[in-house]
Image (spheres, coloured by chain):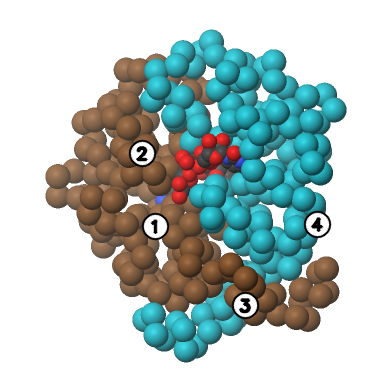
Chain colours: A brown, B cyan
Amino acid sequence: ALLKARGFTAEDFALSHPGGALGRKLLLRVDDIMHSGDEMPHISSDASLRDALLEITRKNMGMTVICNDLMKIEGIFTDGDLRRVFDMGIDIQHASIASVMTPGGIRVRPNTLAVDALNLMQNKNITSVMVADGDHLLGVVHMHDMLRA
Amino acid sequence: ALLKARGFTAEDFALSHPGGALGRKLLLRVDDIMHSGDEMPHISSDASLRDALLEITRKNMGMTVICNDLMKIEGIFTDGDLRRVFDMGIDIQHASIASVMTPGGIRVRPNTLAVDALNLMQNKNITSVMVADGDHLLGVVHMHDMLRA
Ligand SMILES: Nc1ccn([C@@H]2O[C@H](COP(=O)(O)O[C@@]3(C(=O)O)C[C@@H](O)[C@@H](O)[C@@H]([C@H](O)CO)O3)[C@@H](O)[C@H]2O)c(=O)n1
Ligand SMILES: Nc1ccn([C@@H]2O[C@H](COP(=O)(O)O[C@@]3(C(=O)O)C[C@@H](O)[C@@H](O)[C@@H]([C@H](O)CO)O3)[C@@H](O)[C@H]2O)c(=O)n1
């Protein structure tokens, strides 16, 4: 199967394949496909962990950004982080989001090509990335957004 | 950008692109790339939710299968499910995994092409899929496994 894949250009196959949308969006810029405004999961750094979880569920991207009123990024919190917080025995009911978030977080510039953002996500083992101008949050992109038709 | 992407075959680009491993694995079968044996996250249905979370963390795929001693699949539990369990106000410390798992779960046959499994994951909005022969668990594949070089 490996040899066949190499000879036959797996990519042409993937794209001509019925239902295979893979690659169609990969030359777009991330700011063409990102979720922004109301669709973008974000909460303030004085929110509770509980508030953060509700925002993650509302926006359905498996994560939320933590930022201030001017959209300056302070951190990020994912479903995976929730599990680790729980493993550590932290009191989830009463924790503040600031005490458990990942400070900073991985982001790309708005003119980044989707293919480059996808490669970054693979290399870093993450499924979503913030789109930002420096520390200024513009949107969020999930791996699914890049592969979807 | 959209027109350019269509004219220029985004896929060739994606594949010739430095660091762009996208597509290289897509004609392989899922049983060539799946995690099996000790790498495969799985616990028994009489385990606690806490045990499930430790197994998810150990195996680092964001989910665990719930199965019996003969590897018959009973359900699945993901990081996203943990968040929803918490949103519902369930007592996470004392819950059994059987009471909160998703019964059944989405699976593919071992001879499924990676590209087809990837399309399934996109369509179902999931990031990992079980590989099974009927109800018999063989392995688990994450979206990252298909895109990685
Ligand atoms: N092989 C699988 C995989 C998942 N599921 C079930 O499908 C549901 C959604 O899976 P998820 O992994 O929880 O999916 C999430 C979710 O919360 O629904 C996780 C989240 O981090 C994020 O990735 C979002 C976005 O939808 C991504 O676009 O998707 C869950 O009840 C899970 O048990 C399943 O039955 N079989
Ligand atoms: N743009 C981002 C995205 C994530 N992160 C951080 O990177 C770490 C890993 O992200 P994750 O989303 O929690 O990644 C997980 C994890 O638990 O590490 C989630 C899990 O469901 C599964 O997808 C695994 C596997 O590694 C997938 O191969 O990966 C987290 O601390 C998160 O805060 C970040 O700084 N910036």
Cα separation between marks 4 and 3:
20 Å
Cα separation between marks 3 and 1:
25 Å
Do circles 2 and 3 both sit on a common chain?
Answer: yes
Q: Is residue A76 visible?
A: no
Residue at mark 1: C-beta within 8 A of ligand 2 = no
Give SS at disc 2. Answer: helix
Nearest-to-viewer mark from 1 and 4: 4
Do circles 3 and 1 both sit on a common chain?
Answer: yes
Q: Earlier in the sequence, mark 1 or mark 2?
A: 2
Residue B110 place in picture, x, y as percent:
79, 52
* Image quadrant where residue B47 sits: top right
Nearest-to-viewer mark from 2 and 4: 4
Give SS at disc 3. Answer: helix
Residue A56 numbered tag? 2
Cα separation between marks 2 and 4:
35 Å
Disc 4 is attached to a residue of which chain? Answer: B
Residue B118 place in picture, x, y as percent:
62, 58
Q: Residue type at mark 2?
A: Ile
Disc 1 is attached to a residue of which chain? Answer: A
Do circles 2 and 4 both sit on a common chain?
Answer: no
Nearest-to-viewer mark from 3 and 1: 3
Q: Which residue is mark 1?
A: A141
**Seen from this angle, which residue lies furthest bottom?**
B7
Horizontal relation, residue A118 to residue A7: left or right: left
Q: Which residue is mark 3?
A: A16
Nearest-to-viewer mark from 2 and 3: 3
